[in-house]
Image (tube, grey):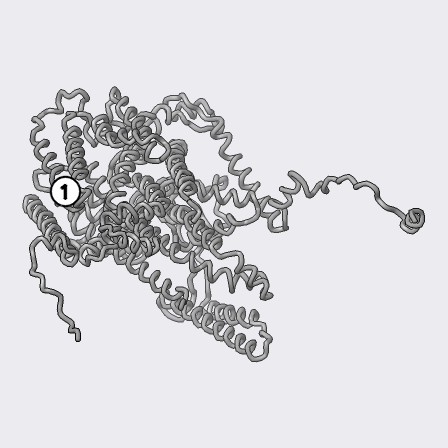
Amino acid sequence: MADQDNNSIAFVATEVIPESPPPARETGVVKWLRENLFSSVTNTILTVLALALIYLVLKSTMPWILNGLWTTSSLAECREILDGTTGACFSVLTERWNQLIYGFKYPVEEYWRPNLAFLLMLVAIAPVLFFDLPRKLLIVTALFPFVAFWLIWGGTILAPLIALIGFIVAGAFFQKFGRNNFALGFFGAIVIALAIWSIGGSMIPEGASENALLPAVPSRDLGGFMLNMMLGLTCVSLSVPLGIALALGRQSNMPLIKGICVVFIEFVRGVPLITLLFVASVMLSYFFPPDATVDLFLRVVIMITLFSAAYIAEVVRGGLAALPKGQYEAADSLGLDYPQAMRLIILPQALKISIPGIVNVAVGLFKDTTLVSVISMFDLVGMIRGPILASTEWNGVYWELFGFAAALFFVVCYGISQYSQWLERKLHKGH
Amino acid sequence: MTTLTDPPKESFRLSMLINDTRYRSLTFQAIAAIALTLAIWYLGNNLIQNLRAAGLNISYAFLGDSAGYDINQRLIEYDSQSSHARAALVGLLNTLLVAFLACITATIFGVVAGVLRLSNNWIVSKLMAVYVEIFRNIPVLIWIIIIFTIMTAVMPGPREFRGDNATSSMVLDLFAFTNRGVYVPMPFFENGLFGNATLNWVLVLLVAVGSWYATRANNARAAKVQADTGVRPNTLWVNLAIWLVPFVVLMFIMGLAWEVPALKGFNFKGGIKIGGPLIALWFALSIYTGAFIAENVRAGIQAVSKGQTEAASALGLRPNKVMNLVILPQALRVIIPPLISQYLNITKNSSLAIAVGYADITATLGGITLNQTGRAIECVLLLMLFYLTASLLISMAMNVYNASVKLKER
């Protein structure tokens, strides 16, 4: 039997053939290259074009960057040393570093104050950005605006102190009465805060700023990238609550309030920021009491805040509209009143949906702070176009300066957008 | 037997204004109305007092005064003796011009970058990602200034085109890139049918519109034949003829010629001059907004689910039919609304012209006129009115479009 089988079947493999490696073109780098770069004729052409482009860009910029000088004192000296070879003159950045960052009027011996405020900002912003950090850090966040104001502007400590006391007392009042009656707590807190500020403000003695611990620095002396960061941070943090209020107003069923919010939002979104900055620089002072002198920084902060609040309102409205109706009905059926429903059910979910949009608005706002250079404030762009390029030493150093400004903005804005994507992934609960 | 009785009449108490939801909203609105009136009264009162103190009044009479400044880049007749209103009109047309040009090029950049970013070529998609991230994350003002610097500081001056061993030369002998602007050849008619050049161009436009309608009619006829017989007649050659023949004949009759810019004296003469500020603004707005449009296009294409492609293929459609009949109509529904709001952004961002000296409406009305006359309130209000009107018109167009492509559901 066994013999017959052996005769009729020519060959039977008794052992498994060893695995042979896949063909060379189907493995590793070669496969990746073939599939991702050279899969068709069009793709190959595109790859070659892209490589050529990258080569051209690198070829024209790398010698310029690598050959750059960092320590000369003027463009003429740079040209002398370079002697006709390609090379950047980065010395303008090192020589004018203080002007680029702090503006040209901020007193040099006080630079530690904005620096300290910047470090405090990192600590204060951390618990807002990362929810895993201990919640106690939020105390730093709450105190930061007052400390930073005192550090940067200097002068009497009484002003930020009174502002802080006003907030604390109003907050305590709201904690006590707002739980049962939101309207009473809310409006009462506003009245109390206003009372404390006006009484306290009148109690600050004349000339309290003259021999204060920190010498006072007027707002018009602020400048450079510091001004961009201050405008960006202040306006974003002020416009988020205002934007939420506007969005709630627009969704409200009270026709008058809804009408006011709609008109405001559509008006602000319809005009460019530049016209609003014109309003701040030439028109707004007509609307203040004749004897009041509101400085330009504050006027610009007001207008930029109103501007970005309208955009944030639209983003939040999108979040509110995206919530299923059942959520509103569920809140109603639990017997919650409007403030409770908003605070406990609606807003936490709606804001979560709107975070990417809000971050987008914040990035846009931060980029738009460069526009203040048009109304002759010396922010980073204003410093470059004004005092630095106009000086005899550095007249003609365009690429180094604009490249530096572009790089600074890129780092900050790209960082924020990467954070936003990370947060979106983290908050996504998969339902 | 039961009878329906009215609920017991409640007498109105004052506390119901706060505690009763029927009246509470009225209370709040009344408070809001009072607060609004007070605020307006306060601001208006301050305004009147300040104006009186400064000896000013609100009047638009200055618009009729002679402006007294020159504008280089203009689409209509204007000189320094023209009125401020005329200057504002020149600025308005310049704003519309740069916005229109930038919308077209930004769309081209955006669509190309958005589609290439989805390419399965690794290096190309990464390159496009770099483009998008770099241009989105740097303020448009910096881009405008950088390109303006290229236009004024890097481009050669007209004198470098002069002489036998000139350091610069015209591209193809037709285009001159100088630091005073770019000169391109200008078409004109040697023996136009009308004396007025504008009327001749209107005629060309009319012929083009006529050709467009004719090709549409031809396509409709082809579709009907296809519906009747199942075979679609070839429309390509007929359409090409409809487009080309009348156009070529018209150009031949009117004698189309090109005026090529040439160096005369210290500057180029002839041709169309596109000023450096216009190019800076146009190009910067295009690449900046193009990066945003690229993201919108990518999102729109990715929003069409893969099942749609597969279903279309299963029905036996060819790849380009799949794209035209299935993917694009659905992707466009997602792409167009953000695209139009990007157009709105371009229009608003064109106000940055003031940073490079392009004479748009912000620079004329809100810049020079405002500074010369000191009529800050009037100028800024007119400026806002213009931009508001433009935005409202664009959003109206968007609403009409949205309504027309809305999914027709039960």
Count up the numbered dots: 1
**Is residue B72 at all visible to an observer of this figure?**
no
Q: Nearer the viewer, residue A39 or B239?
A: A39
* Residue A419 showing in the rendered view: yes
Q: Residue at x 17, y 47 (%)?
A: B376
For disc 1, the chain is: A
Percent x, y of residue A150: 20, 27
The x, y position of residue A225, in whole percent, is 31, 32
Residue A105 picture location, percent across and down: 24, 27
Tell me which corner region of the image, top left, top right, bottom left or bottom right, holds residue B231: bottom right
Q: Residue A375: horizontal and vertical position, in percent?
A: 24, 40
Q: Residue furthest bottom?
A: B228
User: What residue sits 7% from the left and 48% below the top?
Assistant: B45
- A16 sits to left or right of A245: right
**Could you say which is closer to the camera, residue A252 or residue A34?**
A252
Q: Quadrant of the N terminus of chain B?
A: bottom left
Q: What residue do we see at 54% from left, 41% from top?
A: A53
The residue pinned by badge 1 equals: A285
Between A9 and A92, the residue placed more toward the observer is: A9
Secondary structure beneath dot 1 equals helix
Q: Nearer the viewer, residue B10 or B407?
A: B10
Which quarter of the figure is the C terminus of chain B placed in? bottom left
Amino acid of disc 1: Ser
Residue occupying the point 50% across, 39% down? B165
Q: Mark 1 packing: few (<14 Cα in 10 Å), some, or many (20+)? A: many
